[in-house]
Image (cartoon, helix red, strand yellow):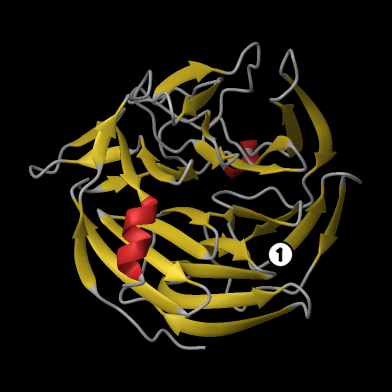
């Protein structure tokens, strides 16, 4: 499969209710109707210990109480089997790697319970820095990341939330931090960083347990927020939005009015693409932690995408 389509166009996001506090490098995920923000760090380098929920229809934020997590950033988060799973957070200050303090536990947040609660349910077989998660048929797939300052991981594991068991699968072709999601029994990864910056698109077939390279990005992507909607995988990176159509094997790139961000989050809830938080770089080169939340009607974009 090759990328057959590529174009430049511009998208204008609208601003909605901001995060209660500016933050970056947080966990993020969606249950389809609400967006979740987990932990993260502020401009003082301190980490948050709460979980925020964004109601897209009402355009407001509230705290998931009485849940308090360990104050961490770079938390991997995913919703599977009706619960929110948290992995790989670190209490490091600022953007230090501090591999020694990566959380080894797998935590399960029952956010639909009358009184939300959090429990440790398993031990992560390979705690990693800047790892990625995706889910397919209520199984959680964990791939890539950093083992230490000089070593990237190429491992792929699957976690069964019902049985609370792990199984190692076929290694990725490259040791790297990468960004990806699963659609229709296949995991796609986009760019990332290993020994060098990467522009490859890889695909893992869950059924046959095999990786193949399926295309290239127009440029390397080394910091991105990734989410998905139906057959589409969506990445935001450095003011640009990439939409990958897994049915067509096609990629489209859009410029946006958001500006340069890193360490942000992105989710799709109620057919709205929501991008939030992160560190914004000004034209003078100054970095500011952001509380701004941007929203876009995804259906309109996809209709034009197919037009």
**Left or right placement of residue 76 versus residue 294 in this view:** right
Please tell me whether mark 1 sits on a helix, a strand or a loop.
Answer: strand
Q: Give whichever of 249, 266 is nearer the camera.
A: 249
Image quadrant in which you'd find residue 172: bottom right
**Which image quarter: residue 244?**
bottom left
Q: Looking at the picture, how far across and down is residue 189, in whole percent?
A: 53, 68
Q: Is residue 7 above or below residue 274?
A: below
Task: Name the residue nearer the viewer: 306 or 165.
Answer: 306
Q: Which residue is more in the foreground, 177 or 290?
A: 290
Residue 74 visible? The answer is no
Number of callouts in the render? 1
Q: Residue at 49% of width from left, 64% of height from top?
A: 232
Question: Which quadrant of the view contains residue 167?
Answer: bottom right
Against 53, residue 287 (above or below) is below
Q: Residue at label 1?
A: 156
Percent coordinates x, y for residue 156 in the rendering: 71, 64
């Amino acid at each position: 499969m090759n990328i057959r389509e590529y174009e430049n166009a511009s998208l204008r996001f609208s601003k909605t209710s901001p995060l209660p506090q500016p933050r970056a490098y947080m966990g993020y995920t969606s249950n389809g109707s609400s967006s979740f923000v987990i932990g993260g760090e502020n401009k003082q380098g301190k980490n948050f210990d709460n979980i925020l929920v964004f109601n897209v229809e009402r355009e407001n934020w509230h705290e998931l109480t009485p849940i308090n997590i360990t104050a961490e950033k770079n938390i991997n988060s995913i919703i599977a089997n009706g619960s929110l799973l948290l992995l790989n957070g670190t209490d490091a200050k600022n953007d230090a790697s501090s591999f020694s303090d990566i959380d080894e536990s797998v935590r399960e947040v029952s956010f639909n319970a009358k009184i939300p609660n959090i429990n440790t349910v398993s031990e992560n077989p390979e705690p990693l820095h800047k790892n990625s998660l995706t889910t397919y048929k209520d199984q959680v797939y964990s791939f890539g990341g950093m083992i230490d300052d000089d070593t990237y991981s190429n491992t792929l594991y699957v976690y069964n939330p019902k049985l609370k068991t792990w199984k190692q699968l076929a290694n990725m072709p490259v040791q790297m931090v990468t960004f990806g999601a699963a659609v229709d029994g296949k995991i796609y990864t986009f760019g990332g960083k290993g020994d060098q910056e990467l522009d490859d698109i890889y695909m893992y077939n869950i059924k046959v347990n095999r990786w193949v390279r399926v295309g290239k990005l127009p440029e390397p992507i080394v910091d991105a927020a990734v989410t998905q909607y139906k057959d589409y995988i969506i990445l935001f990176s450095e003011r640009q939005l990439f939409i990958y159509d897994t049915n067509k094997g096609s990629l489209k790139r859009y410029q946006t009015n958001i500006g340069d961000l890193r360490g942000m989050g992105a989710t799709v809830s109620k057919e709205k693409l929501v991008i939030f938080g992160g560190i914004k770089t000004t034209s003078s080169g100054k970095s500011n932690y952001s509380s701004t939340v941007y929203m876009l009607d995804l259906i309109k974009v996809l209709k034009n995408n197919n037009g």
